Image (tube, rainbow, N blue to C red):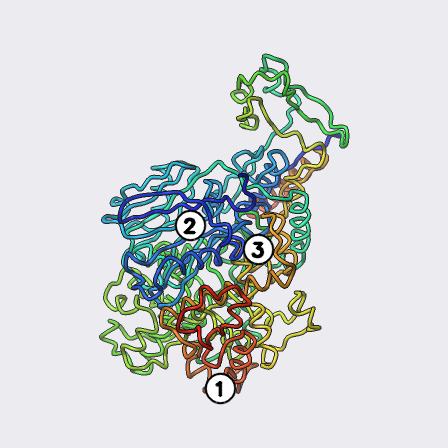
Amino acid sequence: MTMYGWQGKILRVNLTKSEVSVEDLDMQRAKDYIGGIGLGTVYLYDEIDPAVDPLSPQNKLIFATGPLTGTGAPCANRYMLVTKSPLTGAIANASAAGEFAMQIKYAGFDMIIVEGKAKKPVYLWIDDDNVEIRDAQSLWGLNSQQTRDAVVAATSPRAKVASIGPAGEKLVRFACVMNDDDRAAGRSGVGTVMGSKNLKAIAVKGSKGVKVADRKAFYQAAESAFDTLNSDEVTWFHGVGTPGVLGLVQSFGALPTRNFQEGVYEDWQKIDGDALASTISVRKFMGTACPACPVACGRVTRVTDPEFAGVGGGPEYETIGMFGSNCGVSDFNAISKANFICNEMGMDTISAGGTIACAMEMSERGYIPAEDIGFPLRFGDAKAIVKLTEMMANREGFGDVLAEGSYRLAEKYGHPECFMGVKKQDFASYDGRALQGMGLGYATQPRGACHIRGEVQDLDLYGVCVWKLTSDRGITQVDPLRCDDKPLLGKEVQDWFCMIDACGMCNFAFFLHVDEDQTRELIEAATGIDMGGYEGFMRTGERIFNLETLFNRRAGLTGADDTLPKRMLEEPMPDGPAKGHVVKLSEMLPEYYKLRGWDKKGNLTPERAQELGLADRLPASLKQA
Amino acid sequence: MTKMINVDIEKCTGCGCCELWCSFKHKGEFNPSKSRIHKTIFLEQEVSIPVLCRQCEDAWCARICPSGAISKGINALTGATVVTVNKDRCVGCRMCALACPYGCITVMDEGYAEKCDLCDGVPQCVKFCAAGALTFADSDEGILDRKAKVAATLLTAYQEAE
């Protein structure tokens, strides 16, 4: 049977038994959950007990592509990693773009499901239908770039590689998976799970194309999306990349500064997009692209200062916020070096920077003795962010404590209030007190504090509303400090983002104004399925979001985990445009739960589960209303 | 003045849309390995270079073809020079692939040589090149742009020397 959009096959790799098998994609689940985050989550949900130890062989690691992955649809060549997180104990998902994602499809697979644990380090080599589990003992200890180069040399110049670095091997709790040239599936410790399985890398190359069901409709839908993405904003973004938003975040008083103690940073102009594009960026005011992306927001930086020398992808905005303003550091060379180390060692830059900022505050307050760290640690110490990042990746000295993440660091020294995050995962570079929608999003995201899976902050920041979820309701402007509209907007954006993450698209298509219908038309033309219009499209997203939450309930998390640190809820922002504000979570959360069809404890009701087609998957404990 | 696909390497972002939409047009599927244009990314230099058929005036592929399957012609829509393969005459001997200095003609699984045919005058690689690195324009325009860029480089060198 000819497949459209999907390839119709799953590659299953059992590392314990050293066996690989190929199975048909379950088309019912494909239609109900599309791909990426959706398909990955439903397979994980159906196959593991969410209560398992995330670092045990019983956990599974799923590489899931979407039906648009491998096509020429704009910004749509991502893969999603889905597993149980060793950082949060909740569902983990992290995505990245790159030719690695496309090659999974070209090899003929929609997903790779990795199970068990290899006795010795191995890597996987997928050359179309030929799949080998190969010895990787000689690769163990190599950084992500060395691993990529060694695996390419051992396989094919056209192989695309995803791997872990030493941080994943050493089970740093927020290790990431790196693919292609410095692309990171960053958050929630997906690389830690890969490390726990002794899986160093996956190399893949394929010759099978991706077909679409309705070529004419797909061409038109893609043309329309490319047209939307041909704007002055895209040109600007191409020039400065994600660091370009730093000035905007600062202007709202939402730029995390010194572990979220403040919301404006005095030296912000030293670390914004223009500063980066005109100094350490290899190409001046010009980016590089992920596959099939007209935005091209990526960039390579080169630092020549001997102390911080290096070359590589990034740093992105979140990295700059976390290692920069949030650590009180304005030295771009040092920030960039910390970013290089994270890429090489395979570590989430957000959690790494957040953890160092947390340690800085605790050190300044005298909660951590200087002898534990090895030197007196204070905000603004550029050398320290580089040194601690290295120590963390190697679990060396105090780095061993930092490698557990800021939640466990703050707990260990008896000051949990210093942890700035949700569900044990650090905030990204936005302070919720200045962006109320972001505050609600942080509190409610199934994977813990997260900026990328329900970007309410984009509505807050840009204020311009061109999407159906706003325009259909007559909303043209969003005020970031207003609360009453956020429960509805928050829910809708989260549901829509589940669809973006399911089909293989990038968030930036969203904030550069590709709307729900354009995304739906691409999915429908690619796969040939009828999603049931806008309603059906959003309902699919809502189903995915709820299934993630059900996974968390079965893993032991409750509605009580949908909360924020005391600093966000009780300490008013001390300065800047949001001065005097806290996150008014208690005003937003009950309404949000109601809109979600959840009870007061944050549990999905059987009625809404029925409507969403989740009745069969509702845990027994939630079956009585 | 003949039209041709001009490449501005400085603008290329390495997104590979050219490969994807080329294969979609000619193969009915998205498959860069079957595309007639290919980009190569050099990370540390942050440069990506697309390689495609130059539609040579004196095409080596045509010269070496033993069956006379390859010939130079004019695209009716645009007046552009286009070197085309007559499938019916091609014997799949691969001599053209050996001769082409750019690696831009190859014998496919179907058994005959394939190369860029300018999509009958509307090249899809150009249409989907959001960065503007590929343009379908008078060849003289392209070369004049190139000269202007060389001049700009010389200006920098001249000013540095002063």
Of residues B4 and A105, which is closer to you in this image? A105
What amino acid is at disc 2?
Answer: Asn
Q: Residue at x 27, y 66 (%)?
A: A399
Quadrant housing residue A353: bottom left
Residue A106 is situated, as x and y percent measured from the top left of the image, at 48, 41
Density class for disc 1 (Cα within 10 Å; few <14, some 14-19, many ≥20) is some
Chain of the residue where label 1 is placed in the rendered structure:
A
Of residues A602 and A577, which is closer to you in this image? A602
Q: Is residue A23 above or below residue A85?
A: above
Q: Is residue A593 above or below residue B41?
A: below
| 1 vs 2, front mark | 2
Q: Residue at x 60, y 81 (%)?
A: A482
The residue that disc 3 covers is A285
What amino acid is at disc 3?
Answer: Phe
Quadrant housing residue B124: top right
Chain of the residue where label 3 is placed in the rendered structure:
A
Are the residues flagged by discs 3 and 1 in contact, CB closer than 8 Å?
no
Residue A161 is situated, as x and y percent measured from the top left of the image, at 40, 45
The residue that disc 2 covers is A179
Find the distance from the CA under tag 3 to the CA under tag 1: 38 Å
Chain of the residue where label 2 is placed in the rendered structure:
A
**Residue A571 in view, yes or no:** yes
Q: Is residue A397 left or right of residue A48?
A: left
| 3 vs 1, front mark | 1
Q: Is residue A424 left or right of residue A399?
A: right
Q: Is residue A74 above or below residue A426?
A: above
On residue A572, the disc is 1
Dot 2 falls on a residue whose secondary structure is: strand
Dot 3 falls on a residue whose secondary structure is: loop
**Residue B43 in view, yes or no:** no
Disc 3 with disc 1 on a shared chain: yes
